[in-house]
Image (cartoon, rainbow, N blue to C red):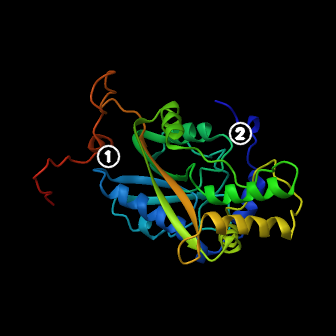
Amino acid sequence: MSSATDIHIFDRKAAALKRARIKKDHLFLFDWAQKQIAERLDVVNRDFDLALQLGTRGDQAPLLSSPKIKTLLSLDTNADSTPGTIADEEMLPLETSSLDLVTSALNLHSINDLPGTLIQIRRALKADGLFVGALLGGETLHELRDSLAQAELKLKDGMSPRVFPFADKQQMGALMQRAGFALPVIDSEIITVTYENIFKLMHDLRFMGESNIIAERSRTNPGKDFFMEAARHYAQNYSEPDGRIRASFEVIFLLGWAPHESQQKPLAPGSAQKKLADALRTDEIKTGEKATP
């Protein structure tokens, strides 16, 4: 396993500082992700004695009130967040085989060594323990990325990275398998949000704790002309009929189990794909049947 010191795409110190400045009324995306994770747990035929959530941005109520979870612990880089352990997700202070459940709502996409963190999560789970996570995917903010790039190409010599890269579903599926998770399930949803203009969008990103933390980012102010050109391009190419601009957020959901001998074994090549019901540990309902309490 490579260490986070070998990979330096993101400035983790800057990430911690930006998360310390978040404002709750800008965390709608995190609220939604927390709720989605709780809903996925609702259909799993398991209870979890000891659970850990990595990152505490967003509404904690769905997990705190989940009948599936007996004890919920928290880990975050921000000392002002919900009470819990303060630590970096790249170096998790977790004992091996100590947890029944780990969740993460939109905190893993800015980790330098994501394969290493996924391996740490899997090792921290007891046999047959569950990981359910959500992270931002490749389609996220593609409109903003394009608009900033076009403005820079028009006004400057070359481009500086201003929107950091996101993994796609195929990459995340491969990483879950590489980390040793059994029965991995990957899916995604696109959330489209509209804003009055590019400046309102960037204001929202700032107070989500999601502004630029790329290690090789430019530290100089690009100037008013740059942002006005980016705003012009954005409005011209990504506007709704009412004149508001749209911003896309792709949320990739991950589900995987720590291996256990009781689990269904991988199917041979050419066999039918495993059923989603098997991965979720829920019952399959055939067409025409009704669910029973």
Residue at image x 69%, y 43%? 112
* Position in image of residue 210 (x %, y %): 67, 61
Q: Residue furthest top?
A: 269
Secondary structure, mark 2, is helix
- Choose top left, top right, bottom left or bottom right for residue 259: top left
Q: Which residue is mark 1?
A: 280
Q: Are marks 1 and 2 in contact (CB under 8 Å)?
A: no
Q: Position of residue 70 (x, y in %)?
A: 39, 59
Q: CA distance from mark 1 to mark 2?
A: 31 Å
Counting residues from the start of the chain, the first of labels 1 and 2 encountered is 2
Q: What residue sits 30% from the left and 43% below the top?
A: 276
Q: Answer with left or right where residue 274 lies relative to residue 153.
A: left
Tell me which amino acid carries mark 2. Answer: Ala
Judging depth in this view, the residue of 45 and 12 nearest the camera is 12
Q: Quadrant of the C terminus?
A: bottom left
Quarter holding residue 262: top left
Q: Position of residue 95 (x, y in %)?
A: 55, 42
Q: Quadrant of the N terminus?
A: top right
Residue 104 visible in the picture: no
Front in this rendered view, residue 163 or 146: 146
| Label 2: how many Cα within 10 Å (few below 14, some 14–19, many 20+) | some
Kind of residue at disc 1: Leu
Q: Which mark is residue 292?
A: none
Q: Residue at x 54, y 52 (%)?
A: 135
Give residue 83's quadrant in the image.
bottom right
Count up the numbered dots.
2
- Residue named by callout 2: 4
Between 172 and 129, the one lying in front of the other is: 172
271 shown above or below 287: above
User: Residue 260, image x and y in percent?
Assistant: 36, 32
